[in-house]
Image (cartoon, grey):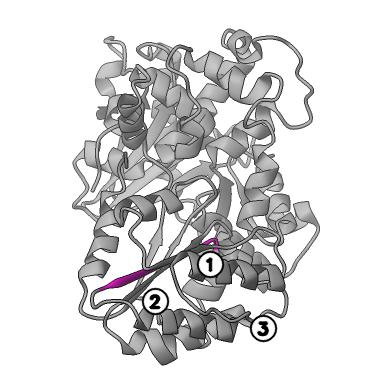
Amino acid sequence: MLIGRQKEQKLLLNALKADESQFIAVYGRRRIGKTYLIRETFQNKFAFQHTGLQKGDKKEQLAEFRRSLKSARMKKIPAFNDWSEAFFSLGQFLETLPEGKKVIFIDELPWLDTPKSKMVSALDHFWNAWASARKDILLVVCGSATSWIISKIVKNYGGLHNRLTRQIYLEPFSLRECELFANANNLKMSRKNILETYMVLGGVPYYWQFLQKENSPAQNIDILFFNRNAELRNEYKALYVSLFKNPQPYIEIVEALGKKKVGMTRQEIINEIKKNEGGKLTKTLEELEECDFIRSYQSFGKKTKETVYQLIDNFTLFYFKFIEGRKIKEKDYWQKMQIKSDYATWCGLAFERVCLQHIEQIKQALGISGIISRVYSWYYKPQTPEESGAQIDLVIDRDDNIINLCEIKYSKSEYVITSAYEKKLRLKADVFQRKTQTRKGVSTIMITSFGLADNQYANDISRKITMDDLFKDFD
């Protein structure tokens, strides 16, 4: 059963109905559901389908492609010496089929591109010289090696430049989609359970399928990460290796960003990894952002060159905090962590990241979806001992002359604003207004898991957003 993905499915089905041949690339991180989406949408009705061999050489890849043609019932298939011959034979086979749209699905396309194989140029020729001249071809390619798909297909400046009719980046599930998944699988999870699981797994459907309804969320995390032979304990290394053909530069940046909660500027990253590769660094940062591992943002009032890059991938941050470098043999480790201060601190940071991943839901809850706005973070470091500093993780600068300063707090029940915290909020707003010299109206928004306790200090909060608002659909 396909959960969510209505927009992506509609794009694929519209391509099926198109009067011209269509070339679509579907990409996204490992385990996100690319192959499942394509197979479910087309109900496995392909004129031809093929999956690349992981770590196969050119000869092995061509032999497997020939076997796929045989499975599609092509007769008299020659042995292939190169990819030009392989795609030529594919075209010959498709010409023998009855009238109607012919869907070609090539999964794990990056694996076909072995050294000196010239596979991309052969695909280029197949599409430009044959398929695009027809009206009945729908070519769908995908692969987990997102950097390869982006550079060789999506941003190809050779023969495939501007040849894609559609590109579909498959995003991680939102909280709402995870709730739909949990309900469809009868997991009997409350929204609090779903949120806390999301803070660990993110929105990767493959990870969620391991959850067992007879276990509590904490028991499930123990089974997945901390028990002997845990299914996801070694997933971190496999994740980056699958996405990037040369994963080390990406891992170095992610590990550097994992050390600093608020993120780093480009120069700070260079200083940390002790490398300055110019355009390569730019490309690596862009691809990490396109895969939803990091986000880039400007501090309010700062210039573009001071862009900050922040690690926001839930799974990676959980790995750094609780798994990397640890040999945990304690039984029921995660269940025991629930009462420790380290867990409470992590929950606060993890909830902030979840909110940053659901900015559109926050805007919708504020009723400003139709208003142009920009999202920033902001901090001020005091210049003298007498001055007060301030840090605001989420600033929404709106074109209706309002700036929302969003405070994000996680708690297991209603959050209580104390007299001291209320003074802190007032001071933050005051420092922000004075140091930015903004002429816009400034209001403080509280984003909490279960809302605010009703007391005299909660009355001054302009708007209150809860966990439930993050679960709402957003088109």
Quadrant of the rendered image containing residue 226: top right
Q: How many marks?
A: 3
Q: CA distance from mark 3 to mark 1?
A: 24 Å
Amino acid type, residue under disc 2 in the picture? Leu
- Closer to the camera in the image, 355 or 202: 202
Residue 251 image offset from top left, x and y in percent: 70, 50
Residue 122 horizontal side relative to residue 405, left or right: right
Q: Is residue 58 above or below residue 284?
A: below
Circles 2 and 1: CB atoms closer than 8 Å: no
Q: Residues within 10 Å of mark 1 (few under 14, many from 20)?
A: many
Residue 293 horizontal side relative to residue 82, left or right: left
Q: CA distance from mark 3 to mark 2?
A: 27 Å
Asked whether residue 442 is in view, the answer is no
- Closer to the camera in the image, 372 or 240: 240
Circle on res. 81: 3
Quadrant of the rendered image containing residue 473: top left
Residue 343, magenta (yes or no): no
Asked whether residue 321 is in view, the answer is yes
Q: Secondary structure at mark 1?
A: helix
Residue 177 image offset from top left, x and y in percent: 33, 36
Amino acid type, residue under disc 3 in the picture? Asn
Q: CA distance from mark 2 to mark 1?
A: 12 Å
Tell me where the magenta segment starts and ends, as one range. 101-108
Circle on res. 164: 2
- Labels 3, 1: front one: 3
Amino acid type, residue under disc 1 in the picture? Ile
Q: Secondary structure at mark 3?
A: loop
